[in-house]
Image (cartoon, helix red, strand yellow):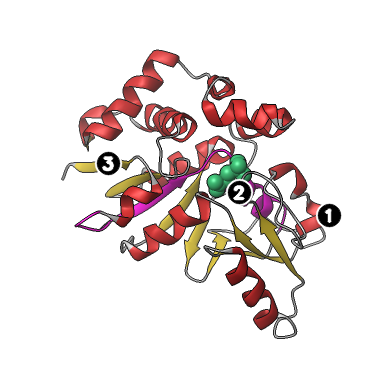
Amino acid sequence: MEKSISLILTAHQLENMRSGISSTAVVYDVLRASSTIITALANGAHEIRPVLEPEEARQLYKDLSGKTDKSILLGGERKGEAIPGFHLGNSPLEYTREQVCNKTIIMTTTNGTRALINSHKAGAKKILIAGFLNQGALVESLRQEPSFTIVCAGIQGQFAYEDFLSAGLMLHRLLDEEGKYHLDDGALAALGLAKGIKNDPTAIFQCFHGRRLIAKNRKADVEFCATVDPFPVLPVFQKPGIHLSSPVPLPGN
Ligand code: 3SL
């Protein structure tokens, strides 16, 4: 049977869709939430708990404190900046092994965590977290999926080039046997862009969100998020938390 791939341009679009997601969702927020989640888990974080609002994150922090043997951190951003009172912002470079190993991180970001939660509400059977950082692992896993829907987080309800480009480059790598898949118009457009641009993730330096982060002295974040394949990991969101599909062994284990 022909496999099908569809693409949704923004997390907000999911809120107005009449039919939900009946297949696996592949969620992209390259700048920066999905890149940060991939990095945190690759560096040994025990679990990421995505929530919509900072207040919800603070409440969950109180509720979980003392009820788990894991240390808990609050992470995320609003307007690209760390949230007052939170331990970590939304730069993947902050989520080092020393900071996050074996910890639970409660995370809220403007678009990325919304895309994950909206995908869950839309009925996605499985939710994978995607970026340049884990492109190879993702491609291998998607070869086994009958069909999937790519959810680009976007930026404040608008189209975001970096998510669309990253999805397109992943499709380009996956579709070495093109005839097997039916692509909707969004997926077809992302693939077309990727074919035109060759495999050059640094194109995200020129997009709105890339330029915005560079203007905030976050060029290192953009460079890092544009790196292909440093982490062969596959984060999966199964409410309430995100874990690796097969955990990376910790040192000493
Ligand atoms: O919107 C989000 O989820 C963030 O990733 C945006 S930012 O890169 O932290 O500004």
**Mark 3 = which residue?**
5
The answer to whether 182 is drawn above or below residue 62 in the figure is above
Residue farthest left in this picture: 1
Residue drawn at (31%, 61%) of the image: 122
Name the side, left or right, on which 117 lies relative to 131.
Answer: left
Q: Secondary structure at mark 2?
A: helix
User: Do residues under tags 3 and 1 come within 8 Å of each other at their CB atoms?
Assistant: no
Label 3: how many Cα within 10 Å (few below 14, some 14–19, many 20+): many
- Circle number at residue 38: 2
x and y, in percent, of residue 81 in the image: 69, 46
x and y, in percent, of residue 46 in the image: 67, 65
Q: Closer to the N terminus: mark 3 or mark 2?
A: 3
Q: Residue flagged by tag 3: what amino acid is it?
A: Ile
Residue drawn at (69%, 44%) of the image: 92
Q: Which residues are magenta?
A: 17-44
Label 2: how many Cα within 10 Å (few below 14, some 14–19, many 20+): many
Q: Closer to the N terminus: mark 3 or mark 1?
A: 3
The answer to whether 141 is drawn above or below residue 202 in the figure is below
